[in-house]
Every structure is written in C-alpha cells, then in structure tokens.
Image (tube, rainbow, N blue to C red):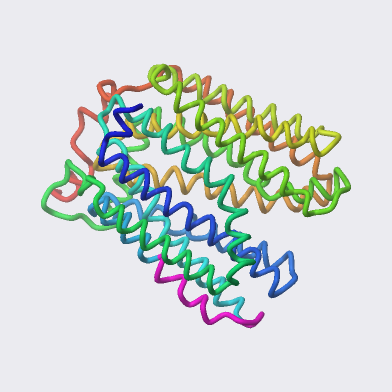
Amino acid sequence: MRDLLRHRGFVLLWCGQFLGFLGDWALRTMLLIWVYQLTRSGIAVSVVGVAEALPLLILAPLAGVFVDRWHRAYTMAGAVIARAVLVLPLLTVTTRAGFGVILGVTVLANAASQFFMPAASAAVPVVVAPEQVGRANSLLSLVSGGITVIAPGAAALLFAGVGPHGAVVAVAALYGLAALVLLFVPAGRPIGRGQETPSVMREMRAGLRYVRRSSLLVSLIAMAFVAMLGVGALSVLDVVFVTRALHLRSETVGLLLTSSGAGTLAGGIAISLLSARMTRSYHWLLGVAALVAGLGYLAYALAPTLPAAAAVLFVVGLSFPPLTVSAMTMVQVVTEDAFMGRVMSLLNTSMAVATIASMACGGVLTDLFGVRQVIAGGAVLLMAAGLLSLRLIRTTPTRQSRPEEAAAEPIPELVDSAS
C-alpha cells in the first residue's frame, strides 16, 4: 500500500477524485436544503432526485464511447471544469421562481458526471500496475467513505454560514482545484485503436458485443442490476422509516445517515488493509458482501429502536466498500483498455435503470404495504444478488486470464471500420 501512496500518478488521481466527489456531495446537500427552503415541498425535493438520475440513464451509454476515444486525464478534468461553470447560474436564484434553474443545473451537472466516472474507472488500470488494481480501488473507496461522513454536515454548515450563493462559489472553487490536479494524471488515450474513427452507434454496438462475449461481465452486470433493484429505493426510505416505523421526528434520520457513512468509512479502511490478501478472492468477497448487506437490511426492517437501526446500518455500511471494490476490480482486470469506458457506462446504465425502477415502485409499495415490508423486500433482492454472484462467478480473473474470446478476436470496432 505504501508503494501506491508514493506513486505520483495514483496520488494525483486519488486527490483529484477526492476534491471532485467533495464538490459533488456539497452541491447535492446544498441543493436539497435550498430547494426545501424555497418550496417547503417534499415533492420538489424528490424531483431534484429524479433530475440527478436522468442523465445517468440517458447519457451513460453515449458517454462511454467518447471516453474510449478521448484522453482520460483531459476527460476527467474537462468534466469537472464543466461542472464548475454549470453551477454558476445558481447565483441568479433568489426566490422560489428559480426552482427551474436549480433543476436545469442539476441535470446538466450530472450529465457532465457521466463522462467523469467511466474515465476515472478506466484510468486506474492505466495508472497502476495490474497487480495493484485491487489495492488502488480499495484506497479510492476511502474517498467515498470519508466524504459520506464529512461532506453532508460540512455542506450544511457552509450553507448556513455563507448562504447559498457563497456555497455555490465554494463548490465551483473545489471543482476548479480538482480539475487542476486531474490534468496531470498520467492516463492518456486508450490503447488498441486504429487511425479511423467509426460512428458512435457502431462503437456502441461494438461495446455491447464485447460485453456479450464475456460471461464474467454479463454476470457482473446482472448481479449489479438485481442488487440495485433491491437497494435503490432503500436509499430514500430512511426518513420514512424514522417517522412511520419508529414514530420519531424526521430530523433524527441524521443519526442513521451518519452511522451508515461511518460504517462505509470503516469498511473502506478494512478493505484497504486486507486488499493485498484478496487478489484471488474478489469473486467470493463480492457475493458474501451482498449477502451481508441484505441480511443487514433485513435486520434494519425489523429494528425496534433508533439505536438498533443505527447499529445495523453501520454493519450494512461496512459491507459496501468490499462489494464495490470487488466488482470494480474484476471489471477493470478483465476489460481491455479500448473498451473500458463503454463497459463502465453499460454497467452504470443497468444500475440506473434498476435504481429508478426501484425508487418508482418503492414509494408506491411503501404507501400500500408499509415501509418495513418494502425494506425487507429490498433486502431479499440484495441477498438474491449475492447468491447469484456466488453461483455465476466462481473465480477471480487476472490480467493474464482474460476471456479467450476477447483476447483472440480483433477489436470489433476496427473490424467494423474496415468493412
């Protein structure tokens, strides 16, 4: 692990992602508070959540094509700079009439993010050696874990201290600093491309064919879809659980969010310390982590008190870094660099579809059957995803053991362009 912390390229990637994610979380928290202050409407807050998800569903497949064409470091920096510019119209919002501006900024800023995440994921196996990919992902998981603990509270304090316009300026400055760091990440254009550039649709079809030929990628995407179908709605039901199941004030949901974030941070630290021993066991870790998270959510659905619910969510949070690190590492190891952006975008798209479907159904089912029952149903789906993973993914791939068909056949986009 120390060698990674002395690796200039990885440190730049780590710091750039930290600053970018910190800006994202600060912006999201600030917008939710601001919208509620302006409208006093729970529906308006939900609409902001939908506006965040729509770009992922619509733009992710297209973004992957361009990520596989462009310089990865410049793509990451450009996406962050775009967000810095796109948040500036928020400075014109002073009344409820500015809600449309907030929605527009939310959609466009999250659209820019669809280019950042595939490029960042594709940069990892380029920046570090193949045997370091798992450890690199483990250290990067600390970014999300740490930010979920510190960013919401810090953003709320910033909003209260300097007001919404001051918070917007601070977020834009964070994005600008992140872009400056990311420009120097040593991750260029993908390897394995010819001089000709096929059409966007042809490259998208090539990406789909590439995924279909890998049973591992198909299994990982299927597992992620089932998992997000179960857990997607749960991410917005905590406040409902607190008020309807525990009969407490809605503000007490902060304890649950903090407990979950602390568990995620602790899980990130644990997987970072153990990553050197897990290089052959990510397939097993993925399935077990999903099962543990599902069992945890089942216990959460049955929790009788707020402290019990918080303790269970801490355990659930512990399981998420091993789950995400395992899945991400296997995808990065088995995927050729020329297809990394499209593969990550397809994975993100499947998760977005499942998340939106889960949220849409979760709210209706909660009103019909109760919040505890819906959380328990989501837990069952998450456990099913874990069992599916253990059944379909029996070994952890290595850089030397990619699917034979992917290694033996020419890159589909080059075949298409020559025909």
Mark yes or no: residue 62 visible: no
Coordinates of residue 29 in the picture (x, y in percent) = 60, 59
In the image, 123: left or right of 369? left
Seen at 26% across and 41% down, the residue is 9
Name the residue nearer the viewer: 61 or 76: 76
Magenta stretch: dominant secondary structure: helix
Q: Is residue 96 magenta?
A: yes
Quadrant assignment, res 59: bottom left
Residue 276, compared with residue 19, is above or below; it is above
The answer to which image quadrant residue 245 occupies is top right
Residue at x 58%, y 70% (from the top left corner):
162
Q: Quadrant of the N terminus?
A: top left
Vertical side of 336 occupied by 166: above or below? below
In the depicted view, which residue is nearer to us: 368 or 4? 4
Please name whichever residue, 132 or 328, is drawn nearer the observer in this view of the structure. Answer: 132
x%, y% of residue 281? 44, 18
Task: Specify the segment rendered in magenta.
Answer: 83-97
User: Picture coordinates of residue 387 (x, y %)?
Assistant: 58, 23
Q: Is residue 140 above or below residue 44?
A: above
Question: Would you say residue 82 sits in the magenta stretch?
Answer: no
The answer to which of 381 and 316 lies nearer the viewer is: 316
Q: Is residue 190 visible?
A: yes
Residue 287 image position (x, y, % from top left): 54, 24
Of all residues, the one furthest to the left in this rendering is: 195
